[in-house]
Image (cartoon, helix red, strand yellow):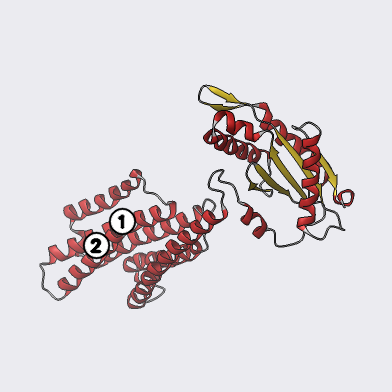
Amino acid sequence: MSIGFVLMVIGSTLAGMGEWQQLPDLVWQLGSIATGIFGYAFIWMGQKALSKRRSNPLDWLAMVPVTLVVAVALVTHFEMVNAYRAATFNLVAAVAFLASSGQFLLDYRSEPLQSRFMLATVNAIAGLLCLNAGVGFLYPDLFLFNPITIFFFFIVLNFALVLFISGMISERAHTKLRRQADTDHLTEISNRRSFFMRLTDNPGLNDIVILLDLDHFKKINDRFGHIAGDAVLQAVAQRVKQCLRPEDLLARYGGEEFIILLPKSGMQQAEIICERIRHKISAQPVSWGDDVIRVTASLGAAIADKDCSELQSLINAADKKLYEAKQQGRNRVEIEDFKTAA
């Protein structure tokens, strides 16, 4: 993107020197249009890479059409006609800005940053202004604003573009730090702190809290080593995630224990999901080198009703049921309503 802005400055400088008759017409006219449209190609590539957080070798295909435009200019010298040169310059800019606007919106689902909307808006306005200018230079009656006004707005939009790009970089860095603070580094799911921060309200009717504890986890560490134990925790976290719905919340509660919130689910849903999790964990051993590690888990769940007033009370009830599951042989599920736990 920096290359694009540098090329734009070079193009503007060449045009200014040409207008003051300090350069031959062919040099400044061909030079300004070539550096200008290549500059916009680089700006589009830069914004696309910024939006997707990576560059793609296929993005260089954007250079093909602008190279063809320059080649046509070398052959026909259409750039010597001011209207054609200005129209080409602005139409290429319009394509670059409008494509960038669409890219920022397209990638919102994979990275929902608010700054994307501002960048999409600035690019869209700049693209529409350039489109009007490009058509207007060919058909003057279609100008919505005079060229000087469009140029002024365009300068302002370029400054806004740089400002919002900086804002997106800052927001992305802040989001990354917040995600790191809220994520358990081993299992890559939410940590205990994040779980409680996201649940600022009291439990709702039929909310379910599940506590899951791996059976005989100390024996796994003693027999296979702590690194193998870490691999088991990672595998279990991923298996549990596969059993949950998008609205459910999973976190590592501590050690080999996990906590799950199922919003507005009820007894039947609790039984289905708990048994699905228990079976998912026990059905397939965790591979560790030449060994296989058999893993089972016990689960305790509690369901909130209208008399439940505190999340901690619901967790305590789930913890009680988890203890009963352990006492009754492990690798099982125990569930009760909050009233029963109270």
Q: Secondary structure at mark 1?
A: helix
Residue that protrudes farthest toward the right in the picture: 340
Q: Secondary structure at mark 2?
A: helix
Q: Visible in this render: residue 340? A: yes
The residue at the point 68 percent across, 29 percent down is 282
Quarter of the image where one finds residue 231: top right
Q: Which residue is mark 1?
A: 42
> Few, some or many C-alpha atoms within 10 Å of disc 1 (few <14, some 14-19, many ≥20)?
many
Q: Which residue is mark 2?
A: 7
Residue that protrudes farthest toward the top in the picture: 290
Quarter of the image where one finds residue 37: bottom left
147 in relation to 70, above or below = below
Relative to the observer, which residue lies in front, 198 or 149? 198
126 sits to left or right of 332:
left
Marks 2 and 1: in contact by CB < 8 Å? yes
> Few, some or many C-alpha atoms within 10 Å of disc 2 (few <14, some 14-19, many ≥20)?
many
Number of numbered tags placed on the structure image: 2
Residue 290 x %, y % = 51, 21
